[in-house]
Image (tube, rainbow, N blue to C red):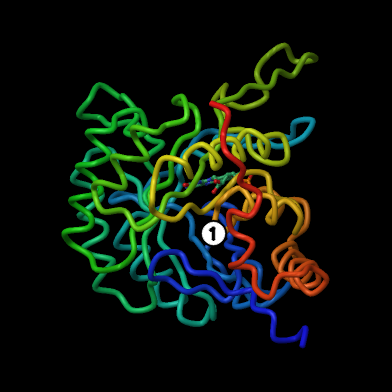
Amino acid sequence: MSDVKSLSVKVGSLELKNPIIAASGTFGYGLEYKDYYPPGELGAVIVKGVSVEPMTGNETPRICETTAGMLNAIGLQNPGLEAFIRDKVPLFESLGAPVLINLFGQRVKDFPLLAKRLSECEGIAGFELNISCPNVEAGGLEFASDPKAVRKIVEAVCKVTSFPVWVKLAPYYGIAVDVARAAEEGGASALTVANTYPALAIDIERKRPLLANITGGLSGPAIKPLTLYHVWKIAERVKIPIVASGGVMGAEDAVEYLMAGACAVQIGTVHFVNPAAGLEIVSSLRQWLEKSPYSSLAEVVGLGRVPSNS
Ligand SMILES: Cc1cc2nc3c(=O)[nH]c(=O)nc-3n(C[C@H](O)[C@H](O)[C@H](O)COP(=O)(O)O)c2cc1C
């Protein structure tokens, strides 16, 4: 019977009722969207990144539209660890979906410090490490370009927590295979592929960049084929699960990522176009599965893979 078809997927030890996950920084702390639909309809929610100290973020404008996407340079604004634990974490149990905390730091030791403290809290299902940020101990070199630093971070985090640890790769260092492997060897449970792409937009009337920060990260439909490529390539090289993030606007984009080998899919920029997107994508995915010959979405993972030519 068609109604027994299962949307559930596994990302390592984490079982999700469906593969659609709200991407960090695009869904607030989960409850901001509750007037549109219950966040518990999603497979999981990844909340806005948290750092040890509060951060005020960049000057405005921090976001702008591009032809097929958006640029953002929010500057990782967040209330800092202690205020996050006091004001945000207690809300997570009411979300009804597993909540992963996106962590970032300025030095290697920030990551385990955050993970250890947060592991003592109720209502958390795992961590996602955002390594697309500068390491002040390495002259501002991004962690994401440094496999040794990534391995150190992941090992240190895995030592202090028993929760799943996902590592979110930056897509702009080749295909980041070394970093993906370093994360795997360090003990990551999954890889998020990937963050935004460095980009620029210029206001030709004002003759200056549209963003106060000059450059920003490109997201949305423009990046989907690029990130799909990374998912495809990285899936060949690592054994841990891949969670895709880049330009998903509808259920068919999600199916593409699943067929490329991702076992779950994040949605980000689409929230800015349609705040109810999460609910609609889950429901279209259910319809797609009903009409398909497959009895579960888990069966679709990797279906599109053929031997690579490079
Ligand atoms: C406004 C905005 C804020 C974001 N903030 C974060 C963040 O705090 N941490 C993080 O790891 N990624 C952050 N991202 C990246 C998204 O989580 C996502 O990986 C990326 O936008 C690609 O997916 P999309 O094309 O579906 O938006 C942010 C993206 C946007 C658009």
Whether residue 91 is visible: yes
Q: Residue furthest front?
A: 307
Q: Is residue 9 above or below residue 132?
A: below
Q: Is residue 269 above or below residue 37?
A: above
Whether residue 61 is visible: no
Instruction: Report the residue at 23% width, 45% height from top.
Output: 153
Q: Residue furthest top?
A: 207
Among the 4 quarters of the image, the one containing residue 4:
bottom right
Measured as percent of width and height from the top left, residue 173 is found at 44, 26
Locate residue 178 relative to residue 57 in the image: left or right.
left
Locate residue 286 relative to residue 12 in the image: left or right.
right
Locate residue 168 relative to residue 19 in the image: left or right.
left
Question: How would you rate the neighbour count of disc 1 (Cα within 10 Å): few for under 14, some for 14-19, many for 20 or more?
Answer: many
Among the 4 quarters of the image, the one containing residue 219:
top right
Measured as percent of width and height from the top left, residue 253 is found at 72, 51
Near-viewer residue (208 or 122)? 122
Q: Is residue 129 above or below residue 3?
A: above
The residue identified by callout 1 is 263
Say what secondary structure mark 1 lies in. loop
Instruction: Report the residue at 80% width, 15% height from top.
Output: 205
Mark 1 belongs to which amino acid? Cys
Near-viewer residue (278 or 253)? 253
Instruction: Report the residue at 46% width, 46% height from top.
Output: 77
Q: Is residue 37 above or below residue 82?
A: below
Measured as percent of width and height from the top left, residue 182 is found at 28, 40
Q: For the N terminus, give its image quadrant.
A: bottom right
Instruction: Report the residue at 61% width, 47% height from top.
Output: 260
